[in-house]
Each structure stands twice: as C-alpha cells, then as structure tokens.
Amino acid sequence: MRRSERKKSKKRNVVLFSALGAVLLALLFLPKDALLMGSEEEPTKEEANKEPKHKVVKLQPDNESAYEDEEREEKETNNKDKSKKQEPSEEIGIDPEKEADKKKKAEAEKKKQQDSGDKPVLNKPIGTSQTGTHTSSYDEGSVDWNEKLKAIRLATGLDENMTVWKIGNGGSPQKSVAEVSPNKQPNEKYTVNLEWVDEKGWMVTSVQK
C-alpha cells in the first residue's frame, strides 16, 4: 500500500474508535429509567394476552346516587320496623297477669260498693245527731222519727217514697216496730224491728216481708 493510503486508514480507524468510545460513555452515564422506557412503551404479546377480557365499568354518579337512595330507604324502613317492634318496650316490666288481677280487683271493689247500697243494713247503728238522754218520739217530722225512717229504708232497700203504715212501741222505751211497703204496693209489707243504741242511733234487728 502507499503511504498516503495508510495514513487515511489510520485516520478512519481513529474516528471509528472515537465514536465507539463516545457511545460507550453515553451508555454508562445514561439513567436506567431511560433504558427501560422503550421496553415499557410497547407491551409484549404475553402481557397483552394477560389483560382481563372483561373490563370493570365504574358506576356513573347518577347510578351511585340512586343506589345510595335505595340503601337509605332500606335503612329508614328497617329503623321504622325496629321502632314498631320496640313500641311495646314502653310496657317492659309490667306483668300482664298482675294488671289483669288489678283490674279484676278494681271491678270487684266497684261492684261491691254499688251493691252495698242495695243490701239491708242490719244489726248496725246508722248514727245519730241526738245528744243526751234519748227519748223515743213518734211525732212525724221529729229528728227521732226521721232517724227511724232512715234506718228502715237502709234495712229494706226502699226509697223515700215508701208507704209507712205504722211506727209504734216495740215492747220497751228504746225499741220500736214499723210496718212499711213500697210506694203504691200495699201487698208487699215489711215488718221492721228497731232498737236504740246510745250515742250510735237506731239499729234494725230484723226485717220480715
């Protein structure tokens, strides 16, 4: 070869080596992320095949609000049902049997009070407003006479319109006997025996019809 050609080939080799050295230096100083970018941009066929066939579709805001409304309505309905079930809890601690017994006792007591006015009051002084030594009186309208009538009505169950056939001495100063009947029913006469109890009033000892 000629000397000139040798010089040219040496220069060419120097340029090639310089270029290769520059490329190697650039590769050494480049960040690793830059090297990986190319591989990440295009997924391989295997990665593409691994993608799910069915994509998950997110609900739109309108649909989400609709579901929230349904859940809210269900919760409100459940709360109402619970409150209805808990309403009887206001009566927790009350025994139904005891309450029934109380009602029965109250009704029995009420009935007893109502019936007591119809039952004859026998062998029990009715009370008196008289004081001092008692003297039996048979004068119509007197205090003693009116108290006799009261004792008779309580013993027979007759009202103030009863017919008085007679009230007389019953065998001693402190005893009396009377014959009375319901108003306008003379065939239903009662014979009533009375006895005075000091400071307690007249007491009916017997009633015969």
Image: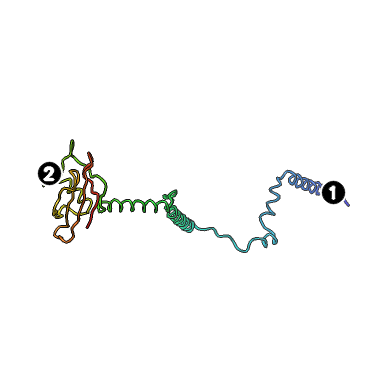
Q: Is 188 situated left or right of 106 in this image? A: left
* Numbered disc 1: secondary structure: helix
Q: Is 188 situated left or right of 15 in this image? A: left
Q: Residue 19: image x %, image y %?
A: 77, 47
Which of these two is toward me, 31 or 172? 172
Q: Residue 107: image x %, image y %?
A: 33, 53
For image coordinates 67% across by 54% down, the residue present is: 40
Residue designated by label 1: 4
Residue designated by label 2: 142
Quarter of the image with the C terminus is bottom left
Type of colouring: rainbow
Which of these two is toward me, 91 or 128? 128
For image coordinates 23% across by 51% down, the residue present is: 155
Q: Amino acid at mark 1?
A: Ser
User: Whole-Å distance between the Cαs marked 1 and 2?
Assistant: 179 Å
Q: Is 130 situated left or right of 67 in this image? A: left
Q: Residue 165: image x %, image y %?
A: 13, 54
Q: Give the tally of numbered discs.
A: 2
Residue at far front of view: 171
Which of these two is toward me, 86 or 52? 86
